[in-house]
Image (spheres, helix red, strand yellow):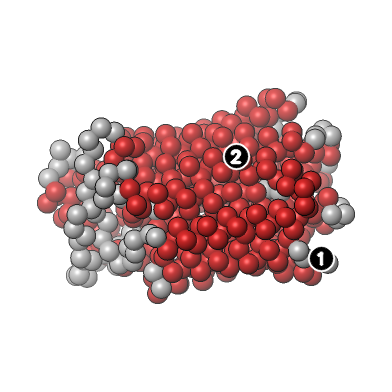
Amino acid sequence: MTTTTDTVRVSERLDALPFTRRHARLLGGSGLGWALDAMDVGLISFIIAALSVQWQLAPGQASWIASAGFAGMAIGASLGGLLADRFGRRHVFALTLLVYGVATGASALVGGLAALLVLRFIVGLGLGAELPVASTYVSEFAPARIRGRLIVFLEAFWAVGWTAAALIGFLVVPSSPDGWRWAFAIGAVPAAYALFVRWGLPESPRWLASRGREEEASVIVRDFEAAAGRVSLSPAPAVAGEEAPLTRSRVGALWAPALRGRTASLWVLWFCVNFSYYGAFIWIPTILVAQGYDLVRSFGFTLIITLAQLPGYAVAAWLIEAWGRRATLATFLAGSAVAAVLFGTASGEVAVIAAGMALSFFNLGAWGALYAATPEAYPTVLRATGSGWAAGIGRIASIAAPLAVPPLLAAGGAPLLFVVFAAFFAVAVVAALCLREQRGRALS
């Protein structure tokens, strides 16, 4: 096993680097995988709307199409983090892309609801594992002074993928009775991309050093130093008292006295944000159709609303290093709560689109800040496990949210539904304010 001095030396060298073309390549390579993930999740909202009409599905049946995927994501996120801490970030990243890419392509061939539910569960296994592993992977390369900003930029690729999903939903899904099949076929692209991830990106040096593979870690760091042409910037100060001993299990260590407060806050955050986000955005096309808009018009509105995600990420990326993690996250969550109420009570096309864009702006900015704050809350030996379990707890909410939408709509329509979402955002604000601020601090 490596010594603490070895691990600190690797960490300090990484934190001393400026942003280089190697960082850009790593961010772009990981971000493209992130965008493909978002495209898969986004596509299902349009496919549900189409299949509800074509297969004459009841609202409860349509809900299970989304929830089956999220059930897989809950398991995948928890297992993916554990595997990444044991076997490395890059290998698990590639495997997850391959699993959900193949399963998405196979979904294009299904002939009934049961087969689709099974494949959506398998898709969720891969997708759920990939997201926390990718954010952990990028955070471990990022210099401390810009780490939060880079993770928000990574999360911004979600908006690219969701916009691609909206375009496919708008142009492909309604084009023919088999349009949804073609949409699934396009979603199989990640299977090929997995090969690039496996061979084109390096393993995390921090993880290698934590596993006693100091020389391998040093070779990768030297590559980044050569790209920078210098190593003269002062490293961020190390944080004392961050190591959590692995007494019984990695999951148990998340609740050690030094970590239990941040773990509790993060689990509440992930649960509340997942419930509100997936409950709203998976159902927006279907809700608009139920309000009298035809399928093409509903998809067009959703595309416009989706475009507001990009400026949300841009503002969050600036604020997260200017204000810090807690203030940025709490502000965007509070904005999401207000926007949810406005969207639920909006009437008329202009009001619906404006409120939807505000919800999109604030909610996705909050996601960027949450993904930045989560990996840096834990030491290297627990980072992927901590991120994965937080995401896994969140996926429990994403399973429940689509199932809760039909009865909430029946009880009080869109106003009640989005007031409930706003309440979850409000609880998340309180949890965000309980987090420890990590801006500019070195990863332990």
Using the image as rendered, state which of residue 225 and residue 120 is in the foreground. 120
Res. 347 mark = 1
What residue is at 34 percent from the left and 52 percent from the top? 261
Which residue is the site of mark 2?
399
Which of marks 1 and 2 precedes in the sequence?
1
Q: Residue 404's spot in the image, x, y percent?
A: 68, 43
- Inspect this view and state whether residue 12 appears: no
Kind of residue sitting beneath label 2: Ile
Amino acid type, residue under disc 1 in the picture: Ser
- Crowding around mark 1 (Cα neighbors within 10 Å: few <14, some 14 to 19, many 20+) is few
Quadrant, the C terminus:
bottom left
Please indicate whether residue 197 sits to the left or right of residue 108 in the image: left
Compared to 154, does 186 lie above or below? above
Q: Is residue 416 left or right of residue 99?
A: right
Q: What residue is drawn where x is 34% and y is 37%?
A: 251
Residue 397 position by quadrant: top right
User: In this rendering, is residue 342 above or below 289?
Assistant: below
Q: Position of residue 214 (x, y in %)?
A: 17, 45
Secondary structure under badge 2? helix
Label 1: which secondary element: loop
Say whether residue 366 is left or right of residue 406.
left
Q: Nearer the viewer, residue 231 or 257?
A: 257
- Residue 302: percent from left, percent from top: 72, 57
Inter-mark Cα distance, 2 to 1: 29 Å
Q: Quadrant of the N terminus?
A: top left
Q: Residue 189 or 342: which is nearer the viewer?
A: 342
